[in-house]
Amino acid sequence: MSTSKAIFEAANHRPQHQCFEFVSYDLEGHALRLNYRLTGGPDPDQSFCEALSLPDSLPAPDPNSPVTQSLLRACLFSFGVSYYKAALPATMKGPPISSQEADFWNLLYSEGMGEFYFRNGLPIPDKVGFETLSNPALSAQIHPQSSHSTKERTLVLIGGGKDSALVAEIVRESGVEAEALSLGNSPWMETCAHASHLKLHRIARQIDPGLLSLNAKGAWNGHVPISACIAAISSLIAHAAGFSDVLVGNERGADDANTEWEGRAINHQWSKSSLFEKQFQNWCSSHAPGAPRYASLLRPLSEIRIAAAFSKCKNQHRAFTSCNRNFRIKVSERPARWCGECAKCTFVALILAPHLSDAEQSAIFDSAVLTQDSNAEHLRALLGLSTIKPWDCVGTAKECWLSLLQLQRQGRLPECLNTLAAEAPQELTGLGFDQAWAEEWSIHTSPLLSEQWQSRLHAYLDAH
């Protein structure tokens, strides 16, 4: 079958619905079901149920708590992106919310899905229909009184990569009572949590098979802001268990866009950005006061400073992997640890290399990732020498250039990369390098992070 014919047939199988319905959220103990429906149009109505098993090692959410009800609604709206994108219907129906709240969810379904729209060649809407849910008369119901414990306890979100592993180490050394939480079943989440002596709780997720079937037939598909989903459900779990903070490991470079399109920044890491973090904190303050504070402990840092700090976490070096292929739904499609041939593997190898000895680097990676011919294009894209930054959670071009040039200064740059290093921007060479490195080494202040955790971050870095 020709490519054009395959695309035509896929388009003919896309759902033709006019409305997306947020039907309900059903909580029974630790079982959470999020129900959706596509209705209207020539295709038969299609119902979906996203099933989430909350960790039974923690208390179940109290359904009578108004904070719980608000956070359940956040879960319903955030996880809905996966089902909404199948048909992109023009209207929405669901639980009534205020116009202020509708603004937040419209942002998630527009800018938050920027990569999805861009890669499918679709215009990014300013609004996607949440304004139809507005009902100011119900505003009193979405301002519950705070009843959350004031005791400081931290829930660390573990993804299995270097960033969350570093957060776990900082929290462990802070002495604050802490435990860990993950979404999914990758064994690397367990090893990272264990290396920092944190008890790990897991959320199990079951995507509705009906969505997978629609995707296989050619429904609209692509990247969704999954970190927003994790923010909502982790806040729900943390509130139920009496945690005061939910800490994640998103760096300041997560604000860096992959490309510009139609005058808008397209960012693969939008739901890891400071914009999302600020918006979610504001949403919690207005609609779920008493919910734990969701914040990134690494927001003040560049990837270079994170890599330097992680290089000293020797207990984590055999416990982590940042290769996203390890987190695929099908276990059979996961590599042993690193695939060694994707942009993420290439980036992590590059950003860590200046801070590790050759022996330490070899002990982490199974192959010489940076010198593989198959990764040459990944390197160029990471350095900003391609049109689009890789669609992955990777650092900025400046951070990548500085890492490459630092290896050259150390006399450790593989000979085959000397030609590439010669293409470095002039402002990053000579004295420009020292200034740029100092800028990336600096610790910024994040208004999204509490003063206590900002102080603990400084103390950790000073000690290491």
Image (spheres, grey):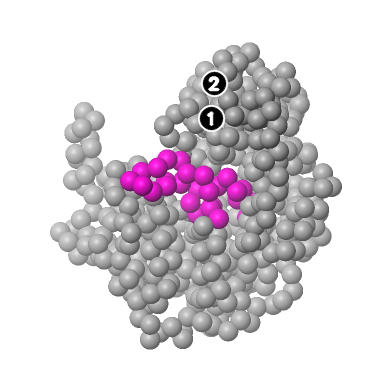
Which amino acid type corresponds to the residue marked 2 in the rendered image?
A: Glu
Amino acid type, residue under disc 1 in the picture: Leu
Q: In this picture, which residue range is highlighted in magenta?
A: 248-274
Disc 1: which residue? 383
Question: Horizontal placement of 112 versus 85: left or right?
Answer: right
Quadrant for the N terminus, please: top left
- The quarter of the picture where residue 38 lies is bottom left
Tell me: residue 374, above or below residue 198: above
Q: Earlier in the sequence, mark 1 or mark 2?
A: 1
Is-magenta flag for residue 366? no
Q: Secondary structure at mark 1?
A: loop
Quadrant position of the C terminus in the picture: top right
Q: Residue at x 77, y 57 (%)?
A: 456
Quadrant hosting residue 80: bottom left
**Residue at horizontal 54 percent and vertical 21 percent from the top:** 423
> What residue would you read off at disc 2?
423
Instruction: Select label 1 or label 2 by which is in front.
Output: 2
Residue 371, picture quadrant: top right
**Is 134 placed above or below 199 here?**
below
Q: Residues within 10 Å of mark 2 (few under 14, many from 20)?
A: few
State whether residue 340 is above or below residue 123: above
Q: Position of residue 355 (x, y in %)?
A: 73, 32
Q: Is residue 271 magenta?
A: yes
Q: Dots 1 and 2: beta carbons under 8 Å?
A: yes
Q: Position of residue 274 (x, y in %)?
A: 55, 55
Is 306 left or right of 21, judged from the image as shown?
right
- Residue with the most extreme right position: 463
